[in-house]
């Protein structure tokens, strides 16, 4: 890109081959070596200066390399070229679109600034990590199929479930929502791209970097990080080297998340088409607006918690070491408070975009306006605010001061109200509609069922005495999978099926899709439903072995989980086969009103040939002559029939 | 642009009455089913009993909500799914209904206020301080629990198993020596984390005699799954008898000792873990003879109080080695009669040490002599794995944490008791 297109600065005396100068994989490989050498030299120099022996220490060098190599890779692959060019004083090139849009599949493996390409990159990368995380789950269930299994050692087992959870949370659920929104959101608000396309590209490329770091921990001496995705100190600060792959890998995934959220916020606030007032925004946009607020405020806290772990491990700061200093200076509960101050809002980061997807699908597939649009939007904002007031409900048995539990129980119950409003509004939207029961709608209805169960067990968990009995047992495992699998993943499947024609320009096989839904729905409930029972019976979570009395249920759960794993392969086959050879999709196969469906499938390179003017609400189904957007300038944009108004007339 | 127009065929009108009737019937059946499910283990404490009632209330409150969701979905799919010829029609443009929205905000709010108030009352009842509490100090470490019974005016009594009298309020004071653990007896329905640096508290009033598992529920490293102990709920008189027979002094001052006593056989209490029990020792400071391993204590009449031959004849190193054995926590995982320890996580040293070291495969990697074999087994535990045991459980850091001198003493001790 810049290195090629900038002959003025091409005065280099070293004749580097073109491939090594241009951004791309060759230069990334070269930069990786440079990053390695830099980290190595830096560590040794500092150790000499600090009189540390031996000078070459593999542990110290690895920690530094985990920071330098990924950063050098990101520079090498070309995410920062334009910024360096601009810092050198190069003039801005407003009409330069070298890195925009994809013409062949190879373009998806390069740094690209087109939000549609980045969206696809995000979604495909995330689904790769879904399959990896799912494979780990299969191995976990192999170990747990019978008591006394020696399929893996206990240490390896702890590594398996830790990487499973971390990969699926940080490399699947959070980024896949960012990916879907990346593709859909600018189209929905009538924008040609995101506000900061280059930042968008950098956000994407940090993701595989973080994911590979997490997976590479399996190669570390002492095995993968094995302190759970929660990485509670002081267990995490006393773990072998693999733990640092988590500590630092999360920083990359977290930075990616924060940058994307800022990008969404600025895009939504500043780049809406004429007439697109906030109360004409599709609810998916509202959902991502709310999610982005959560990400921007909360994610720095997990970064802080992991930096504290890093400083504890690498430089012996003793934040969390309770047995050091004259007064036992470390504070173990500090970690949990900082961690959950992020990680509770994170569960809303992992479900609010799904709420947005479900709102889109249920309105379109029921052919009715969304019921109570404004309450749907306000309840999202209520969740954002309340989401910051409930973190310590994860700590009812942690030994924190007892009184804190009661306000946290009350806020946890209050946050169920906006969630309940959303569920009831979706049900009311279904009522008297014309329900198109295709795959996307089935997943939406399946979501309503399983997420309601997850929400009900969530209210039970808010009740302190009951939580004391079931916390840290399989009941928690059941609950989190009902809200993250039956909740988030069902909405993701629904969203991928719904926008598949728009993203690929092809139709998927609906029969295979429905087979995928039913097999997933049945095996899901048979896998995670029984976990409620063994949890209440007292089986602890995160155990490589268990008492004989839990054996029957565990065998059933393991067999069902393998069925659940196989059902995902139907989805993978359907997506791959349909993308390669599915029938071409028309622009608006679902007869939806929102703007992304008013352009071709896939959309033109800059989204809209004419900037649309928005004249009505996004869900005016059943209103005669209703339109949401018109592809004309604001002065000429007049709807032909009755003017469709915003949901509540004003 | 969609073609939805008002020219749609007139759709059948449905009354909500059948749906309402279905919902009521389904709720009744649903409540009957969830109350019939055997959710909990036996309740063995006052606290557990209250929590079970709370759970029943939660179930009864939850079923109607879930039934509402699936009933509306089910009837919508049944009545309002798109039929042939309806491909292009839209539903009625209903944007909302303020009265309905107020109802479904207020009704759950009222329910939640009730549930929160009820939970708080259960919480206070469960955690209120009682006048005649017995205090038990629980110490957790990787990967064992230790129980100490403070005695007024005397040194505390120590035990690797939890003994509590029935009907008596207990205050557990819980500590951790390394990472976070959690102390949980499912039948008591109470748990709390053991947090390094602070002392946490838990109140339980046992109401049922029996033998119950104690589980660590907070991930604490490689041995987490195996960090289990046993709770015995005894009649008060038997508890007092048991308490009097226990050694009054901890075996070392620096570390909480482990494996200091054998659990007694409890008359009238079904024991699911017979290998853990040995006959009530007359004095547990007298080591049981090596020949009568507690793991094989199927013939209690043969128990002899003769001190182990090794105790009198071994060198000072062996005596020091016993102290190392006790203070380093070996007994929390290994059974060894000479040290009166009863751990079951690792191999039984009383019965297996000699035969395992005589195994040719072992002699190849750990040397032919017993002392070389034991030394290697401590410093490099995974070099040879005895049948039935796996790598990753025993810490491989003893060479570093104990040092050669202590390991030498430990080896002398183990050699002296392995005859």
Image (tube, coloured by chain):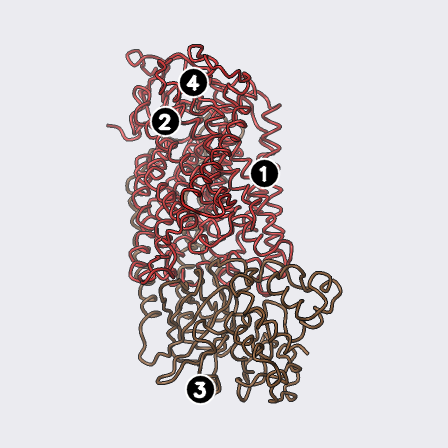
Chain colours: A red, B brown
Give the Cα distance between marks 1 and 3. Answer: 63 Å
Q: Residue at x 29, y 21 (%)?
A: A275
**Tag 4 subunit:** A
**In this rendering, is residue A6 above or below B113?**
above
Marks 1 & 2, CB-CB < 8 Å contact:
no
Q: CA distance from mark 1 to mark 2?
A: 30 Å
Disc 3 and disc 4 in contact, CB within 8 angstroms: no
Kindly report the distance in space between the C-alpha atoms of the residues bearing marks 3 and 2. 75 Å
The part of the image, by quadrant, that contains residue B294 is: bottom right
What percent of the width, then of the height, locates residue A408? 31, 55
How busy is the neighbourhood of tag 2: few (under 14 within 10 Å), some, or many (20 plus)?
many
Kindly indicate whether the residues beneath marks 1 and 3 are on one polypeptide chain. no
Residue located farthest toward the left when viewing the structure as drawn: A650
| Closer-to-camera residue (B136/A451) | B136
Q: Secondary structure at mark 1?
A: helix
Q: Specify which label sits upstream in the sequence, 1 or 2.
A: 1
Dot 1, how many residues are within 10 Å of its Cα: few (below 14), some (14-19), or many (20+)? many
Instruction: Using the rendered image of the protein, determine whether residue A129 is visible from the camera's viewpoint.
Output: yes
CA distance for labels 1 and 4: 32 Å
Q: Which residue in the structure is indicated by mark 1?
A: A516
Residue at the disc numbered 4: A607
Q: The residue tagged with tag 4: helix, strand or loop?
A: loop
Q: Which mark is residue A618?
A: 2
| Residue B284 shown left or right of residue B363 in the figure | left
- Considering depth in this image, is A565 or A592 the residue closer to the camera? A565
Disc sitting over residue B240 in the figure? 3
Helix, strand or loop at disc 3? helix
- Location of the C terminus of chain A by quadrant is top left
């Amino acid at each position: 890109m810049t290195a090629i297109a900038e002959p003025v600065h091409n005065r280099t005396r070293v004749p580097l081959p073109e491939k090594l100068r241009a951004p791309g994989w060759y230069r990334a490989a070269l930069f990786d070596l440079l990053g390695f050498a830099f980290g190595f030299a830096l560590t040794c120099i500092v150790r000499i200066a600090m009189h540390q022996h031996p000078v070459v220490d593999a542990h110290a060098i690895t920690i530094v390399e985990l920071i330098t190599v990924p950063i050098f890779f990101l520079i090498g692959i070309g995410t920062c070229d334009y910024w360096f060019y601009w810092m050198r004083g190069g003039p801005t090139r407003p009409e330069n679109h070298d890195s925009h849009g994809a013409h062949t599949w190879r373009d998806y493996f390069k740094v690209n600034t087109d939000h549609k390409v980045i969206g696809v990159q995000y979604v495909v990368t995330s689904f790769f990590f879904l399959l990896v995380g799912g494979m780990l789950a299969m191995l976990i269930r192999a170990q747990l199929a019978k008591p006394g299994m020696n399929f893996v050692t206990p240490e390896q087992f702890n590594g398996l479930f830790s990487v499973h959870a971390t990969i699926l949370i940080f490399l699947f659920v959070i980024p896949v929502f960012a990916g879907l929104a990346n593709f859909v959101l600018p189209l929905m608000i009538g924008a040609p791209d995101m506000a900061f396309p280059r930042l968008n590209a950098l956000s994407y490329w940090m993701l595989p970097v973080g994911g590979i770091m997490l997976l590479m921990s399996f190669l570390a001496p002492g095995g993968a990080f094995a302190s759970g995705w929660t990485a509670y100190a002081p267990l995490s600060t006393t773990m072998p080297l693999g733990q640092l792959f988590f500590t630092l890998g999360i920083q990359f995934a977290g930075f990616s998340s924060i940058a994307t959220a800022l990008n969404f916020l600025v895009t939504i606030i500043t780049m809406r088409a004429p007439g697109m007032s906030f109360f004409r925004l599709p609810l998916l946009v509202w959902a991502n607006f709310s999610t982005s607020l959560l990400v921007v405020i909360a994610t720095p806290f997990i970064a802080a918690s992991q930096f504290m772990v890093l400083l504890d491990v690498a430089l012996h700061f003793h934040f969390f070491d309770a047995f050091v200093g004259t007064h036992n200076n470390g504070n173990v509960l500090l970690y949990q408070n900082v961690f959950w101050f992020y990680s509770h809002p994170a569960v809303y980061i992992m479900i609010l975009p799904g709420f947005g997807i479900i709102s889109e699908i249920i309105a379109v597939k029921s052919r009715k306006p969304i019921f109570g649009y404004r309450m749907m939007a306000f309840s999202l904002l209520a969740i954002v605010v309340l989401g910051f007031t409930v973190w310590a409900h994860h700590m009812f048995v942690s030994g924190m001061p007892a009184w804190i539990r009661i306000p946290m129980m009350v806020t946890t119950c209050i946050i169920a109200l906006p969630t309940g409003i959303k569920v009831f509004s979706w049900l009311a939207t279904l009522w008297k509609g014309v329900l198109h029961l295709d795959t996307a709608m089935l997943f939406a209805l399946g979501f309503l069922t399983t997420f309601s169960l997850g929400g009900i067990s969530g209210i039970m968990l808010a009740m302190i005495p009951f939580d004391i009995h079931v916390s840290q047992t399989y009941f928690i495992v059941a609950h989190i999978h009902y809200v993250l699998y039956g909740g988030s993943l069902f909405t993701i499947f629904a969203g991928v099926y719904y926008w598949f024609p728009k993203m690929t320009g092809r139709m998927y096989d609906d029969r295979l899709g429905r087979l995928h839904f039913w097999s997933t729905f049945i095996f899901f409930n048979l896998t995670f439903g029984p976990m409620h029972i063994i949890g209440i019976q007292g089986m602890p979570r995160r155990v490589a072995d268990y008492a004989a009395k839990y054996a029957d249920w565990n065998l059933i759960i393991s067999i069902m989980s393998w069925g659940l794993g196989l059902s995902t392969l139907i989805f993978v086959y359907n997506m791959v086969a349909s993308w390669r050879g599915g029938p071409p999709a028309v622009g608006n196969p679902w007869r939806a009103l929102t703007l992304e469906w008013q352009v071709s499938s896939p959309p033109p390179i800059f989204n809209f040939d004419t900037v649309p003017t928005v004249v009505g609400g996004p869900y005016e189904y059943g209103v005669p002559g209703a339109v949401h957007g018109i592809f004309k300038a604001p002065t000429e944009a007049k709807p032909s029939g009755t003017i469709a108004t915003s949901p509540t007339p004003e | 642009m969609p073609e939805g127009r008002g020219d749609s065929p007139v759709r059948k009108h449905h009354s909500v009455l059948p749906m309402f009737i279905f919902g009521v019937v389904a709720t009744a059946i649903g409540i009957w089913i969830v109350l019939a499910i055997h959710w909990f283990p036996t309740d063995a404490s006052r606290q557990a009993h209250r929590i079970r009632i709370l759970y029943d209330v939660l179930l009864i409150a939850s079923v109607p909500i879930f039934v509402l969701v699936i009933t509306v979905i089910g009837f919508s799919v049944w009545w309002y799914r798109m039929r042939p010829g309806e491909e292009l029609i839209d539903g009625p443009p209903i944007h909302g209904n303020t009265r309905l929205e107020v109802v479904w905000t207020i009704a759950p709010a009222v329910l939640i206020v009730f549930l929160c108030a009820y939970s708080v009352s259960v919480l206070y009842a469960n955690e209120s301080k009682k006048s005649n509490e017995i205090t038990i100090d629980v110490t957790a470490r990787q990967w064992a629990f230790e129980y100490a019974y403070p005695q007024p005016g005397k040194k505390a009594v120590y035990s690797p198993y939890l003994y509590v009298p029935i009907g008596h309020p207990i205050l557990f004071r819980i500590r951790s020596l390394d990472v976070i653990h959690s102390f949980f007896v499912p039948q008591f329905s109470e748990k709390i984390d053991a947090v390094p640096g602070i002392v946490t508290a838990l109140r339980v009033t046992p109401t049922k005699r029996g033998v119950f598992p104690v589980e660590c529920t907070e991930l604490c490293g490689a041995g987490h799954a195996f960090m289990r102990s046993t709770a015995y709920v005894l009649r008060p008189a038997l508890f007092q008898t048991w308490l009097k027979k226990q050694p009054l002094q901890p075996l070392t001052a620096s570390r909480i000792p482990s494996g200091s006593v054998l659990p007694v056989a409890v008359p009238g209490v079904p024991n699911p873990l017979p290998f853990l029990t040995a006959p009530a020792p007359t004095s547990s400071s007298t080591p049981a003879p090596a020949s009568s391993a507690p793991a094989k204590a199927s013939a209690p009449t043969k128990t002899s109080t003769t001190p182990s031959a090794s105790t009198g004849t071994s060198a000072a190193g062996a005596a020091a080695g016993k102290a190392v054995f006790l203070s380093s926590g070996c007994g929390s995982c290994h059974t060894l009669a000479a040290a009166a320890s009863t751990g079951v996580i690792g191999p039984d040293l009383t019965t297996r040490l000699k035969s395992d070291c005589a195994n040719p495969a072992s002699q190849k990697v750990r040397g032919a002599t017993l002392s070389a074999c034991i030394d290697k087994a401590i410093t490099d535990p995974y070099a040879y794995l005895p049948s039935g045991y796996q790598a990753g459980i025993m810490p491989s850091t003893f060479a570093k944490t104990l040092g050669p001198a202590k390991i030498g003493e430990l080896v002398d001790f183990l050699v002296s008791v392995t005859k």
